[in-house]
Amino acid sequence: MARRRPTLADPHASSALAHQFEDLGQQHESASLGMWIFLATEVMFFGGLFAGYTIYRNMYTAGFVAGSHELNVTIGAINTAVLICSSLTMALAVRAAQLGKRIPLVTLLIATILLGLAFVIIKLTLEWRHDYLEGLVPGLNFTFAGPNARSMELFFCFYFVMTGVHALHMVVGVGVLFWLVVQAWKGRFGPERFNFVEGAGLYWHFVDIIWIFLFPLLYLIGGRY
Amino acid sequence: MATAAVELDTRVHYLNANYGIKSWLLTTDHKRIAILYMASITFFFLIGGLAATLIRIHLIEPNGAVFEPGTYNKLFSMHGIVMVFFFLIPSIPAVLGNFLVPMMIGARDLAFPKLNLLSWYVFMAGGILVLYSVIWGGVDTGWTFYTPLSTSYVNSNVLSAAFGVFIAGFSSILTGLNFVVTIHKMRAPGMTWFRMPLFLWAMYATSIIQILGTPVVAITLVLVAVERMFHVGIFDPAVGGDPILFQHLFWFYSHPAVYIMILPSMGVVSELITCFAKKRIFGYSFVAFSSVAIAVISFLVWGHHMFVSGQSIYAGIIFSALSFLVAIPSAIKVFNWTATLYKGSISYQAPMLYAMGFIGLFTMGGLTGLFLATLATDTHLHDTYFVVGHFHYIMVGGAVMGYLGGIHFWWPKITGRLYPDGWARLAAAIVFIGFNLTFFPQYMLGYLGMPRRYAIYSPEFQVLNVMSSAGASILAVGYAIPLVYLIWSMRYGPEAGPNPWGAKGLEWETPSPPPTENFEEIPVVSEEAYAYGAKEAHVG
């Protein structure tokens, strides 16, 4: 018995169903799997950086520890808290989308955006700017002179690439959330159509988790405490 | 005949469903996107082929017949970058895979049609940037962008070329993602994993490599760009960086990338051998799992590119052993295809000639790979023309033969028309002869010690180099002939009908060319793949 494609006259038809799928369940599973695979590519993308960092940290431990000591743990910890809160609002937003609650969805998405922007702004003004003024930015302004200056420079290369790529992911995420806010305001999401919110949520949590790994690797390890 | 031609023109199918440039550039139909890719990569193939032609002309004379050494460096870099990233990697997945994956599993389209179109635009953006880089000013690092050469020493367009490759990588990732989701979630009723055509197993394995490998080369190129732009030492030993780390990261993708090129061809060959021997595949599950095994092992062998570049000897030994492992699933495939031919009723139409050519040339390329995986012989052969011969036997003798075989096999399905079989067989024979004449001498040159990437060489190598260049001109003729008769057939070829080869598979059960939605009704699958001769067996 061949499965039939739902038509508009079909009681099971839904405007939320794209033409290539048979039913909403299949569509949801596909969107979900697609997002997880995308996150796997992101793991490999950051994985290259983590591998390089680990190898160099092993080769130049003293310089990397010294570099780590130049970072501000308090600000890093505050930013970690900000991101974890944003993950909470994001998870609640996904739930609101599934339940079709429009106003809570919009509110929670905006809260997530604000927390995300707070993270990037704190990073930019309190950390990167400070590093630049201190002469800790390789290639632009690196004036540190000490026994481990060269390997410390390597540490800061990785620090800026890793936190920079991470911040870029945050900015992209904020852009996606803006688009979701507009769609949510128009009432586009509901129990049949929440794949976009769910996918954006998975992405947002993933970017948070990257930070959860970056924070100890860059700030904490090295026998400071 | 006249009525048949009218039938092809009047019936609504994906090619005439709508007209105009917009209907192509904004299409989300996987079949049309496949054709966009086909046109694009043919163009890139011509660019890369032009560079190859100039290289072979230059190498006719020991002191270099035509170019300055710097220009020669730019030519072989252009040839490598364009052929690897813009022809071979997208070739079968983006053209035949796009066209066939939904049809073979009985779906109306890929899971994410808009993403599929996006991947073509991403590909073209990367391609145009790379073309700009290699033509206006050029790149002279080779396709490998080795540091610190690429970051500290050369003045060519490394940044824009690397950025172009970076962008195109996302096209490859998106295609792989689309295929994995489609194969997992969109199979028609009854299409179980072990009823899938082996082409799909090959595409699945390829997609895994695209998904997991490509991001690593992407971040590596980002680091190269950072080092080159800001003059910091990530890979430059002058500032504490390690160039071997670059090689590790680069080959972590770029060795599996070889399997992105060869696995899809293996999938095509499984389809061709069964159809033209009219037999079930011998050992279906072995062939299927050997694709997966190749994908998995491909991620564990990258270190064999660094046997002589400063990697520890213990790592070398382990990578050598792991590299030998790839030979096992590869050999399983070759033996199973050969066993499939046994007592088959074999017909030698053009696609079958390419498939047979593939088996022979791939075997040669694979066996010479064992020489290079062996530590001691690699010390002698590393960076010689032996390596060039080896990977051209895999990438051209393997991947391109498979691509051409697949194009000839599914051309009647794609266009609805037949090409002249006599010309096609002639072209297949010319390609085979020209290929061997081009690249077999390179094995000998490498064994005798001629290094690769040099614009000049010792006079004693001239005879073999002239043979290679002569072979290349024959190969060029072999590639030009199909271009002519395939384009001719689009207008003048006789109508093919739904299944001109008597092949099995869902794609042959729908008209040629297929309707936009592929099937009138979603099919229900009740038999395994390659059920050739099932009726006879039943009667017997």
Image (tube, rainbow, N blue to C red):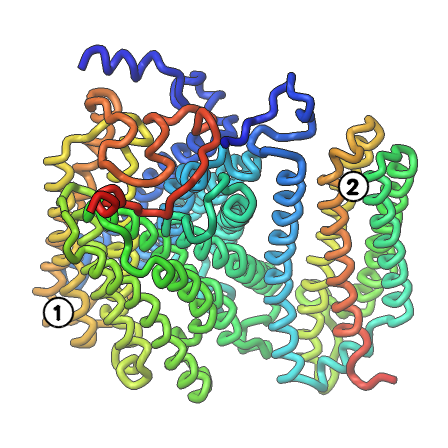
Q: Nearer the viewer, residue B504 or A173?
A: B504
Q: Number of numbered discs present?
A: 2
The residue lying furthest to the left in this view is B463
Disc 2 chain ID: A
Q: In screen coordinates, is A70 left or right of B417? A: right
Report the residue at 47% width, 43% height from top. Answer: B190
Q: In screen coordinates, is B507 left or right of A193? A: left
Whether B333 is drawn above or below B431: the answer is below
Q: Hey, what amino acid is under mark 2?
A: Leu
Q: Residue under label 1, please give it.
A: B461
Q: Nearer the viewer, residue B118 or A49?
A: B118
Does residue B170 appear anywhere in the picture?
Answer: yes
Does residue B157 appear anywhere in the picture?
Answer: no
Name the image quarter holding the N terminus of chain B.
top left
**Image position, residue B266 (x, y; %):** 32, 55
**What numbered label is drawn on residue A177?**
2
Q: Rate crowding at label 2 as few (under 14), some (14 to 19) or many (20 or more) other CA atoms within 10 Å.
A: many
Report the residue at 26% width, 82% height from top. Answer: B377
Q: Nearer the viewer, residue B328 or A218?
A: B328
Whether B83 is drawn above or below A59: the answer is above
**Image position, residue B519 (x, y; %):** 44, 28
Q: In screen coordinates, is B134 left or right of A75? A: left
**Image position, residue B448 (x, y; %):** 16, 76
Q: Hey, what amino acid is under mark 1?
A: Phe
Q: Secondary structure at mark 1?
A: helix
Q: Do pointers 2 and 1 mark residues of a single chain?
A: no
